[in-house]
C-alpha cells in the first residue's frame, strides 16, 4: 500500500466495475436504438472522462462511429455543493449544426450544468441533443431536465471513483463508491 492510500479515507462500493460494464453495454443498445445521425459525443469534463471513454469504445463495438468532443463546465469548482452558476471553462471545437449530439456526463443532480449545455448546443443548431448520464439523483433537481439514457439511479451520497472525485482524489478507482464518514 502506498502513502496516498493510507492517507485517504475508506470508500464503500456502490457499483462495482462489472455492474458498470454491463450497464454501459445496455446504454449503448439504447443509444443505437435512438438511431443517431451524424453523431457527435460531447463528454462533460472532468468527471465523465472514464465513463465517456468506456461508452465510446462500446459504441464502436456496436457499429457507431461518433466524433468525440469535450466541454468543461463547472458549477462546483472545489466545493461539494453546486454554486448554481454554470461557467464554460473549455468549449468544443466541432460544429454541431444539423447533427445529433450526445452529451455524456457523470451525474445528473441539480440539472443546471446539463440544462445549460443542452440549451447551448440547441442554440448552436444541433438537430437533436440527447443526454446520457452514468448516475441520476432525481430528488436533487433544481431545473427541469431529464436524461435520455441513465446508467443508475443513485442514492443521495457524494460519490467518487470511475472518474469522479473529491478535491481531485479517487478518480482512478474502477468502481463507484462513497466515503461513509462523509455521509453523516
Image (tube, grey):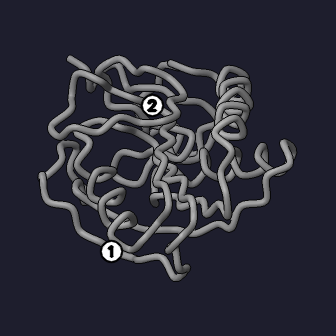
Determine the residue positioned at 68% across, 44% down: 35
Whether 20 is drawn above or below 121: the answer is above
Determine the residue positioned at 48% across, 36% down: 148
Q: Position of residue 59 (x, y in %)?
A: 76, 47
- In this view, the residue in front, 36 or 68, is 36
Q: Position of residue 21 (x, y in %)?
A: 72, 29
Determine the residue positioned at 39% across, 32% down: 159
Based on the displayed image, in which of its 4 quarters is residue 75 positioned?
Answer: bottom left
Q: Does residue 107 appear to the left or right of 56 in the view shown?
A: left
For the residue labelled by badge 1, is the local secondary structure a helix, a strand or a loop? strand
Based on the displayed image, in which of its 4 quarters is residue 166 positioned?
Answer: top left
Q: How many marks?
A: 2
Q: Position of residue 105 (x, y in %)?
A: 46, 48
Q: Does residue 142 appear to the left or right of 120 in the view shown?
A: left
Quadrant in the picture for the C terminus: top left
Quadrant in the picture for the N terminus: top right
Whether 136 is drawn above or below 32: the answer is above
Based on the displayed image, in which of its 4 quarters is residue 119 positioned?
Answer: bottom left
Q: Does residue 101 appear to the left or right of 85 in the view shown?
A: right
* Dot 1 alpha-carbon crowd within 10 angstroms: few under 14, some 14 to 19, many 20 or more: few
Comes first in the chain, label 2 or label 1: 1
How far apart are the two marked residues, 2 and 1, measured between alpha carbons? 23 Å
Residue under label 1: 89
Amino acid at each position: 500500500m502506498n502513502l496516498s492510500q493510507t492517507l485517504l479515507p475508506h470508500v464503500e462500493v456502490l457499483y462495482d466495475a462489472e455492474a458498470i460494464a454491463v450497464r454501459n453495454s445496455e446504454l449503448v443498445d439504447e443509444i443505437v436504438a435512438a438511431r443517431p445521425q451524424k453523431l457527435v459525443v460531447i463528454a462533460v469534463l472532468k468527471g465523465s472522462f472514464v465513463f465517456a471513454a468506456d461508452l465510446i469504445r462500446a459504441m464502436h463495438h456496436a457499429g457507431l462511429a461518433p466524433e468525440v468532443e469535450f466541454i468543461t463546465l463547472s458549477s462546483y469548482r472545489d466545493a461539494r455543493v453546486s454554486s448554481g452558476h454554470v461557467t464554460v471553462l473549455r468549449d468544443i471545437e466541432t460544429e454541431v449544426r444539423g447533427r445529433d449530439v450526445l452529451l455524456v456526463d457523470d451525474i445528473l443532480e441539480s440539472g443546471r450544468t446539463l440544462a445549460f449545455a443542452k440549451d447551448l448546443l440547441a442554440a448552436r443548431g444541433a438537430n437533436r441533443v440527447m443526454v446520457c448520464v452514468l448516475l441520476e439523483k432525481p430528488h436533487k433537481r433544481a431545473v427541469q431536465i431529464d436524461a435520455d439514457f441513465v446508467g443508475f439511479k443513485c442514492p443521495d451520497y457524494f460519490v467518487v471513483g470511475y472518474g469522479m472525485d473529491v478535491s481531485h482524489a479517487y478518480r482512478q478507482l474502477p468502481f463507484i463508491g462513497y466515503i461513509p464518514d462523509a455521509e453523516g
